[in-house]
Image (cartoon, rainbow, N blue to C red):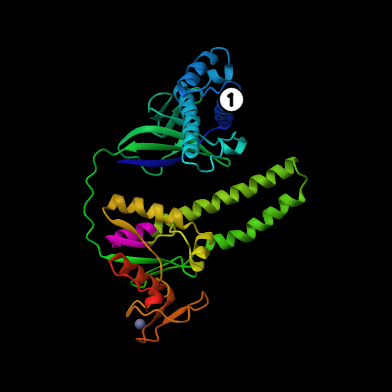
Amino acid sequence: MRKAFKYRLYPNRAQTEALSEILETHRRLYNAGLDERRAAWENERHSVRYTEQSARFKEERRSNEFYARLNFSSAQATLRRLNLAFEAFFRRVKAGENPGYPRFKGRSRFESICFPSYGDGCRMREDEQGRARLYLQNIGQIKVKLHRPWEGTIKTVTVKREVDKWYVILSCDLGEVTTPCHRGPAVGIDLGLKAFLVTSDGWKVDPPRFYLEAQTRLRRLQRRVARRKKGSGRWRKACRDVARLHGHIANQRRDFHHKTARTLVQQYGTIYVEDLNIKGIARTRLAKSTHDVGWGQFVNILSSKAEEAGAQVKRVDPAYTTQACSRCGAIPEVRLTLRDRMYSCDSCGFTADRDENAALNVLAVGLGCSLRSPSTA
Ligand SMILES: [Zn+2]
């Protein structure tokens, strides 16, 4: 099993410059490779292969001082990334989909470099005082904050920039992991609008407040960008502040998702969630998916945490989970609207919080019940 460990890097000023320059060279290499493939196809109907580009890079780095400063394997990784973009493009063409030709990477669209084999141009080390350092070829030893140790054997190393912060991601091989069988009970989850989620046994997680709070700050910063002269130094600084706040919000959200997922996985062995990808999304669910709380990310985090703990996450068809009565299965003639916070059944008198009723239905569908469709009711 593979697992990724991400740590913050603290490069000094010279190292930051060197890292930025290397990232920029990778970006140019990517774009040059893309340009070459494009020209060869347009002029000679020749499709350039990865091996050709890799060999040419080996030639060029003898005379190009920028290329010479790149670790050879990491440059190959960038060319392979380009190759993947083209393979995906050809696959889409073949499938008759809208192909979308691979695009040139703008300055803010190329933020990471990969060292595909650990030890080649990159290594985790300790300095004389036993503090963690990341050694990178042509850059030296960079300070790392090792907030928790990594596990297993490091396989690949990725260096990434997020706005103005740098990170290292170690992808580690944990070997054959025998996960214990999780004996916890099953639960259904409704991804709510008022609440972030509600479980079938009534646990309610409130939506993340920080996002709303940050909105006010974000609007203020965006107004500042609008007021300043485009392209000026002060404008650039304001843009950076906006990007930084976006990054901050994303981090907080991810943190919140991790914590919520951990709590669920500790308690439950099988977790049923609504499948938000099913086509023909009903209006309430559309609202949920556009509501900016990142359901997709949450369900992904939940799934990977569950896998580690031997628990399971299963997606169920969410049709009628909001409308049906979770006790008797009746479906009301008048549809519930988003404004109806309580569910009350005319047939059996059952009343519950609207989202809790939905969560109970998600659990029921997960356990094999089918909710009646209104036409047969
Ligand atoms: Zn009922």
Give the crowd class for mark 1: few <14, some 14-19, many >=20 residues within 10 Å: some
- From what the image shows, is residue 201 above or below residue 241? below
Horizontal arrangement in the rendering, residue 221 relative to residue 315 (left or right): right
Q: Quadrant of the N terminus?
A: top left
Q: Position of residue 210 (x, y in %)?
A: 54, 60
User: Ligand 1 closer than 8 Å to the CB at disc 1?
Assistant: no
Question: Where on the image, by quarter, is ligand 1?
Answer: bottom left
Looking at the rendered structure, the secondary structure element under dot 1 is helix
**Residue 124 sits in quarter:** top left
- From what the image shows, is residue 66 above or below residue 150? above
Residue 169 visible at all: yes
- Report the residue at 64% width, 45% height from top: 240
Q: Quadrant of the C terminus?
A: bottom left
- Report the residue at 44% width, 59% height from top: 276
- From what the image shows, is residue 244 above or below residue 103? below
Residue 255 visible at all: no
Q: Position of residue 9 (x, y in %)?
A: 49, 37
- Report the residue at 52% width, 52% height from top: 250
Numbered-mark total: 1
Q: Position of residue 306 (x, y in %)?
A: 31, 54
Horizontal arrangement in the rendering, residue 233 relative to residue 248 (left or right): right
Q: Position of residue 133 (x, y in %)?
A: 43, 32
334 or 227: which is nearer to us?
Answer: 334
Q: Amino acid at mark 1?
A: Ala
**Residue 273 sits in quarter:** bottom left
- Report the residue at 38% width, 75% height from top: 357
Question: Would residue 19 be counted in the magenta stretch?
Answer: no
Query: Which residue does the numbered mark 1 point to in the structure image?
Result: 32
Where are the magenta residues, as a range? 261-273
Question: Would residue 263 be counted in the magenta stretch?
Answer: yes
